[in-house]
Image (tube, rainbow, N blue to C red):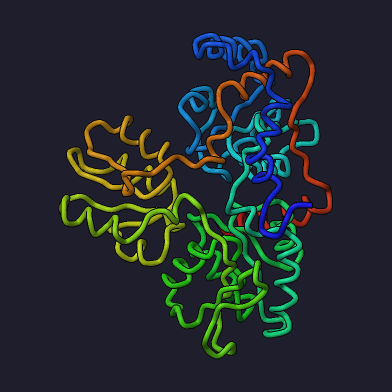
Amino acid sequence: MVGAGISLMEVLDVLDIESEVSLPKRYSELSEEEMTARVREIKAKFGERLFIPGHHYQKDEVIQFADARGDSLKLAQICTTKPEAEFIPFCGVHFMAETADMLTGPDQKVILPDMRAGCSMADMADIDQTEEGWEAMQEVWGDTILPLTYVNSTAAIKGFVGKHGGATVTSSNAKKMLEWAFTQKERILFLPDQHLGRNTAYDLGIPLEQMAVWAPLKGEFEYEGDFEDVKVILWKGHCSVHEKFNIKHIENLRDKEPEMKVLVHPECTFDVVQASDLNGSTSFIINTIENAEPGSKWAIGTEMNLVNRLAMENPDKEIVSLNPFMCPCLTMNRIDLPHLLWSLEKLEQGEVVNQITVPQEVAENAVLALNRMLERS
């Protein structure tokens, strides 16, 4: 039995069971050139029957084969425009593949080349914890709460939110969706990333004193004020990458490079976002850098693969990570060239491995949550 707060993905990661069972040893003996050539060969063979979406945070060895790059929701939406694609090896993480499966047709098969590619943030809100927390919140505030969930969440959580009249949000439209949510109910539950919820609510003028935190592992609220004053309930979850940026990084940068601008993702902590020059979604970060003046200097607080790619693709600007000791997201980087090749060679042999399927009832409610967002975006 997996203990409270420990996901199955984390257990597999520790034991390294999945890689030993699923990936034959011969893939470790192939050169990168051999694997690259084979992937290109299989892609050419399948043609339009194969569509590979690649998230911005993926390794270069994988992203080079992406038929489309983007954030999780954009990629899932692009998949819906490819009805001719029978097979969709999703180069991202598990919750992204779930969304793609829910939005694509019944004859399309979404594949996750490495099943260990999870998301620590999504794992911080499982369905049992959420239902227990919801019950506790109903006892305190009654039917005054509308749940919202970041798209970086499991299909089960999206389904829960859809069932209770709520919607999904992205880091691009979170402000707009919170504004809508407050027209529906007096209070908002924001899952699973407390930092995006806090930063967005604060931008809407809600003071920190009106935000309570629900700690699922303790089964209690972290709040010292009057519960009647609460407008936003924040789930105690976070992105393990973005939480590694801290105020000291900004202070050190200001001392050494005062002309360098700080650009961070709103999954960063409140103090980091407040101290930055700009904050916004992955798309906002990319667009800001691409449109920046030549010679401008930027310290970026987001996943290292993306920062490195932005630096490479924008040589006319100086681009560094806000945290010079930052490592790439471990789960986002699970899908590597050997796993991608293995999943494609299995398709070539007529076998579909690691197919992601969402139960119909969960999918129906989750799509409700997604559609409520898409109708307002």
Name the residue at 24% across, 52% down. Answer: 261
Residue 245 vertical position relative to residue 202 in the rendered view, above or below = above
**Is residue 84 among the parts visible in the rendering?**
no
* Image quarter of the C terminus: bottom right
Name the residue at 51% across, 54% down. Answer: 239
Q: Position of residue 210 (x, y in %)?
A: 50, 82
Viewer-closest of 207 and 305: 305
Residue 320 vertical position relative to residue 234 in the rendered view, above or below = above
Viewer-closest of 352 and 185: 352
Q: Position of residue 79 (x, y in %)?
A: 64, 35
Viewer-closest of 63 and 238: 238
Viewer-closest of 328 and 178: 328
Q: Is residue 285 left or right of residue 158?
A: left
The answer to which quarter of the image holds residue 164 is bottom right
**Is residue 77 among the parts visible in the rendering?**
yes
Name the residue at 43% across, 44% down. Answer: 303
Residue 43 vertical position relative to residue 173 in the rendered view, above or below = above
The answer to which quarter of the image holds residue 357 is top right
Q: Position of residue 376 (x, y in %)?
A: 58, 59
